[in-house]
Image (cartoon, grey):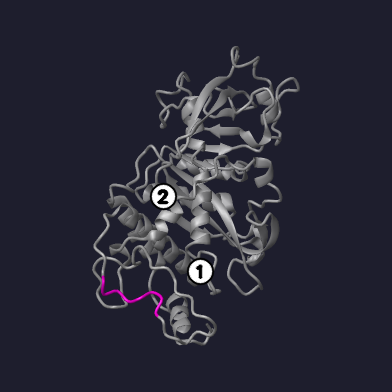
Amino acid sequence: MGAGAPSVQRLQFFLSESTWDSGKVNDRRLEMLREQPETAPHDGGAIVIDDSGDRKDGKATAHVGRQWLGRWGKTDNCVVTVTTVWTDGRVYYLLHAVPYTPAQHFRRGRNDPDFRAKPQLSAALAAAGKEAGFPCRVVVADCAYSVSDDWCYTLREARLPYVVHLTPHRGTWAPADQPHTAVDAARALAWRDAGYPGDWTSVERHFRDGHTESWWAADATLGGWQPHGPCRLVVATTDPATLPDKATWYLATNLPHPDAPHTATSPHRPADLAEIVRLYGLRPWIEQSYKQIKDELGWVDFQVRSDTAIRRHQTLVNCAFTFCWDQWFAPPGPLDATAPDPCPDTGTERGTNHTPPAPTALLAQGLTRSAVLAHPGHHPAPLVASLDRQGPARRTPSPARRGHHRQTS
């Protein structure tokens, strides 16, 4: 359809020129999620932080710049958005999204007082999620965020616990005879075999599809990270002997050890090794949400340039995802026999007509206000069933691969 078509022009006006507030719409969306028992947050879930890029040509679009595109495995012209997702492994949904503005858009670059790096944006979003009424056991992030002291400081100021993946081979100051990287710290742990595990503890991971995996976890010592200190380093792996790159996590957390002396005074409940592994295991659900909002709901398909229009488009996509959850938990309504045929035979198409198979259910079921209008909150969404069948990645991508050429500021 051409850009000059009336329907396209109306959509452009709605996104770019109208006066509605995307922030207020998002607040109302979050209110709906809090009110519905099936999606209501609780303090056993996690707020997961990540960022994702969408390729865009030219230089006129707000926030555009040459940045790392994880989905394509290369640096290209794109718009990167920092997002937060609340999940407990059963349900998951986006809370907030903020486009990241590269330094070249500011007069003084990274030294400009208005510039905000991705870790700064993400920490502020996690705090905003808590303020919006979404409690969590922990904030989870991958290794791209572990390099920022500001990120940890902002979360501590907001009294939010965190579990963040460390870059395995990133060094830290320590005496010459002590470990200097997370990998060194893991290799210093005693291990013989499963019968004599030494410093390691067996943990069992449970997945949504019902299968389980046996992992091993241990508290390690690296610089200021101490098992009974205010910050811990927890190593989790499928094989302590070889520490395979794609199945080993190096997790920094401020959740106290159950036997730590400061447990009684800590603002956070203590966590054993099994719980820390479980919490970081929730991180892939933000990747799953990206699959659905991008591949199914049109997150990347915006054809607008202004910051306001981009944020509005993202808000509407998040609303659509929320409607899907609403319909997933809603009881099915009666079929509406008066709904129009989704594939009418108008005879105007060129070529051979192929009669589509009869649908098992109409898209707009239940009550409709007119022949062409159906409230998305009152009708089942077959889309949700197809989305639910797409299980999340069973393992978090390896830190080395995800961090390749990735910019955090």
Q: Which residue is drawn at 37% across and 47% down?
A: 134
Q: Nearer the viewer, residue 7 or 155?
A: 7
The amino acid on which the numbered mark 1 sits, given as a three-letter code, is: Ile
Callout 2 environment at 10 Å: few (<14), some (14 to 19), or many (20+)? Answer: many
Give left or right: position of 6 versus 224.
left
Q: Which of 161 and 54 is in front in this view?
A: 54
Is residue 384 visible to us here?
yes
List x then y, in percent, for residue 368. 26, 72
> Is 325 contained in the magenta span?
no
Which portion, as a residue range, is magenta?
A: 337-344
Does residue 12 appear to the left or right of 70 in the view shown?
A: left
Residue 370 or 162: which is nearer the viewer?
370
Query: Label 2: which residue?
Result: 129
Counting from the top left corner in percent of width and height, residue 118 is at 58, 53
Label 1 vs label 2: CA separation? 21 Å
Q: In this view, does 374 lie to the left or right of 273?
A: left
- Write down the residue under mark 1: 310
